[in-house]
Every structure is written in C-alpha cells, then in structure tokens.
Image: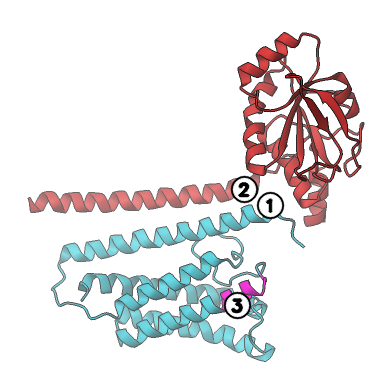
C-alpha cells in the first residue's frame, strides 16, 4: 500500500518526463533518426518510421499518466519502454560503441546529446522501478490543499534535480573526451 | 503546533528547490568551465634530447651518498619523473608537493635534481620540504644532459628508457600534461588540437606548449 500522494507525484512526474521527451524527439526528429540509426539494432528501412512512432508512443503514455488512465498498464508499458532503451544502450556499450549519442538529450543545457554510458542505463532502470511503484495499490485518503502544494514542490524539485543529473553526465563525457584522443 | 509544522514544511520545500537550483547552476558552470578552459601544456625547449629518443643511463651521487641512475630502461619498468628544483626558486617550492602526490598516484619513480656548490643549503632544503625519502641529485652534468635552462623543469623517462616528455613546468597542469603526453602518445597540445580539430589549429598557435 502506498500513499495516494506518492502515486500522484509519480504520475505527474512521468507525464512531464514523457511529454518533454516526446516533444524533444519530434522537434529534433532528424537528429533523433540519426541517433536511432546509430544504435545499429534496426533494419535501415524501419529507422525513419520508428523515429516518428516512438515519440507518438511516448506522448500517448505521457497523456495516460496525466489523466491516470489505466494506471497499472501504463506503468508497465513505461517500465518496458525504459527497459528496452536501457537494453539498447547496454548492447551498444558491450559492442564498444560508446561514442554514439544516446538520443535522449534533454533537460540539461543546450548542447549535443550525451554519449552512451552505464550511468544512462542505470538511470533508465531506476526510472523503470519508480514507474512500477506507481502500479502498487494505493490507500484511500482525501488530498487536502497541503498535499497539492507538496505535489507541486516535489515535481519542481525532481525536475530540477533531473536536469542537474543530466548536466553532470554531460560534464563527465566532456572530461572523458579530453582524456583520450578521439579516433 | 500544526501551523508551525505547515510553515516549516513550506519553508523546507522552498529550501530544497533553491538547493536543487544551486546544484544545477553549479553543474552547468562546471560544464562551461570545461568548454572554456583550454588545456595547458608544459613549455618544451627545442634543445637537448628529443622526445622519443632512447636516453643513456647515467649514475649520479645522491645527496645522501647513494647512487642514483637516471635514463635507460628501468628494472621494474616504472616511468621516472625528474624534477629540477633549487633552493632559490620560489615556484619550485610550491610545485614539490604536487610532484610528490602525482608521482604517488601515477606510480612514477620521482627524482629531484639541482645544482650548486653549497651542499648544506640543499640538505636544509630537502629537510624543509620533507622529501628526504626521494633521491636528490646535485649535479651539473645531469642538468646539461637534458639541456635544462630554466626551473622548475621536468623530464619524464618511460620504463623502457625512452624520453616521453619534457618541459618547463610551473603548475600542476603542466606536470600532468607530461604524463598525459606519455599516456596518449601525443607530443604536444598543438599536435592534440591538430588531431581532434584541424580547423582550430590556428587559434592555438600562439599558446606556449
């Protein structure tokens, strides 16, 4: 049993995350298609359609989180999507293709995509776990004015911390690129 | 009581958000610093043995009387960092702890070198800096062998006896650039910039390396 406020906070956060991610992928769709192709996991013909389909799927999930439509299924689908992303990154990290962009660059200062790293895989897996928490049955409690205030503050704080984390990953990549000459 | 909790809760939330913003701002600032601060390399003289040449082993007498060999292949294939310092050079004094900590973290064999007549002055200097654990050579011949003209000067000899890098070192960055140069096989900063971004080569030409 979790408190309804926890479920609400997670829903709102995932709605924000998925809608922003979808928006980012649509607004930079050529870049995203290139990043997706770089992963080298898909036949070439399917890269472009999928580059358009993924943001649509993300946006639909985001809207479902926002309206709390079928919470259990949506949480599962979101965790599955994040898991697929993490697996795609892990496969390319194993292949040694660390130089390709992750296609997930938003939330930090404008700039290029951060390159793949195990941090990104960990981040996605953690996000997947958090999504599953929202699928747990929640207790019934009337939410008061203070709860809504907490929700807004918690959302703000996590958004800013997420951006900070993304920035740190980017810094790490920048430092690493000085250390060894690129080929 | 409830009012107090409410106020403290709201206040704490505000502080959390301000803190998160500060963390974000710091992270971005670090990112900007990495973009803006160009790496510094040690100033490399054109005289003396060239980087990539095999050095000749030569044995000198340390300040404590023990023989110290510089150059040539090393028994346990550790790289040797020779740092020329002098009791009359203020920058050297600041650089010694840096060299000691770097030698420890990079597993380098550290040798200090100097020249001059008054051995007592050197002994006091070594005691003052607390570097009696490292070989300290007072020899003009060693300085001449590597064409040392200005202090503090450092050379890095690889475990195989090949001269890996050398230069005038004033800061930790300069010292680290010697190790970085050995590890990456890139001779100088100009070479590095030329490899990574041929178009930016011109803008860094004026920088000492």
Q: Is residue B78 above or below residue A48?
A: above
Which dot, 3 or 1, sits closer to the camera? 3
Q: The residue tagged with tag 1: helix, strand or loop?
A: helix
Q: Residue at x 48, y 68 (%)?
A: A122
Query: What numbered label is drawn on residue B34?
Result: 2
The structure residue drawn at horizontal position 21% and vertical position 74%, both measured from the top left corner, is A4
Residue closest to the far front: B66
Does the CB distance between marks 1 and 2 fall below 8 Å?
yes
Which residue is painted at 58% across and 55% down in the image?
A172
Which picture quadrant has residue B137? top right
Q: Identify the element where label 3 is drawn.
A: helix
Residue on which the image places disc 3: A91
Q: Chain of mark 2?
A: B
- Image quadrant in which the N terminus of chain A is located: bottom left
Colour of chain B, in one word, is red
Instruction: Identify the element where label 2 is drawn.
Output: helix
Q: Is A91 one of the magenta-colored residues? A: yes
Q: Is residue B166 left or right of residue B47?
A: left
Q: Position of residue A11 (x, y in %)?
A: 32, 75
**A58 or B42: nearer the eye?**
B42
- Mark 2 residue crowding within 10 angstroms, few (<14) / some (14–19) / many (20+): some
Marks 2 and 3 close (CB-CB < 8 Å):
no
Q: Which residues are magenta?
A: A88-97
Depicted B31 relative to depicted B119: above or below = below
Can you tell which chain is drawn cyan? A
* Drawn side of residue B26 relative to residue A96, left or right: left
Badge number at residue A178: 1
């Amino acid at each position: 049993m979790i408190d309804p406020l926890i479920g609400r906070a997670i829903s709102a956060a995932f709605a924000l995350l998925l809608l922003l991610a979808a928006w980012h992928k649509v607004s930079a769709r050529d870049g995203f298609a290139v990043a997706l192709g770089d992963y080298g996991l898909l036949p070439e013909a399917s890269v472009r359609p999928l580059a358009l389909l993924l943001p649509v799927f993300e946006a639909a999930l985001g809207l479902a989180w926002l309206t709390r439509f079928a919470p259990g299924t949506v949480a599962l689908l979101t965790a599955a999507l994040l898991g697929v992303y993490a697996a795609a990154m892990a496969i390319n990290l194993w292949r040694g293709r660390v130089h390709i962009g992750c296609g997930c660059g938003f939330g930090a200062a404008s700039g290029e995509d951060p390159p793949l790293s195990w941090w990104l895989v960990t981040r996605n897996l953690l996000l997947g776990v958090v999504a599953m928490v929202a699928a747990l049955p929640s207790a019934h409690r009337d939410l008061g004015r203070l709860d809504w205030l907490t929700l807004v503050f918690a959302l703000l704080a996590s958004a800013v911390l997420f951006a900070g984390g993304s920035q740190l990953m980017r810094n790490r990549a920048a430092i690493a690129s000085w250390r060894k000459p690129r080929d | 009581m409830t009012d107090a909790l409410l106020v403290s809760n709201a206040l704490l939330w505000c502080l959390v958000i301000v803190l998160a913003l500060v963390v974000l701002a710091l992270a971005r600032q670090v990112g900007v610093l990495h973009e803006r601060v160009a790496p510094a390399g040690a100033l490399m003289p054109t005289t003396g043995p060239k980087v990539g040449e095999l050095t000749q082993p030569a044995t000198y007498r340390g300040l404590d009387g023990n023989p110290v060999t510089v150059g040539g292949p090393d028994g346990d294939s550790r790289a040797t960092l020779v740092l020329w310092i002098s009791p009359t050079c203020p920058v050297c004094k600041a650089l010694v702890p840096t060299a000691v900590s770097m030698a420890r973290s990079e597993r380098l064999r550290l040798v200090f070198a100097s020249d001059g007549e008054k051995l007592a002055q050197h002994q006091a200097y070594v005691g003052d800096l607390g570097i009696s654990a490292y070989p300290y050579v007072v020899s003009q011949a060693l300085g001449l062998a590597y064409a040392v003209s200005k202090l503090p000067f450092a050379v890095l000899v690889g475990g195989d006896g090949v001269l890996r890098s050398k230069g005038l070192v004033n800061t930790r960055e300069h010292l680290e650039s010697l190790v970085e140069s050995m590890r990456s096989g890139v001779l100088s900063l100009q070479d590095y910039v030329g490899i990574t971004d041929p178009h930016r080569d011109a803008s860094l030409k004026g920088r000492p390396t």
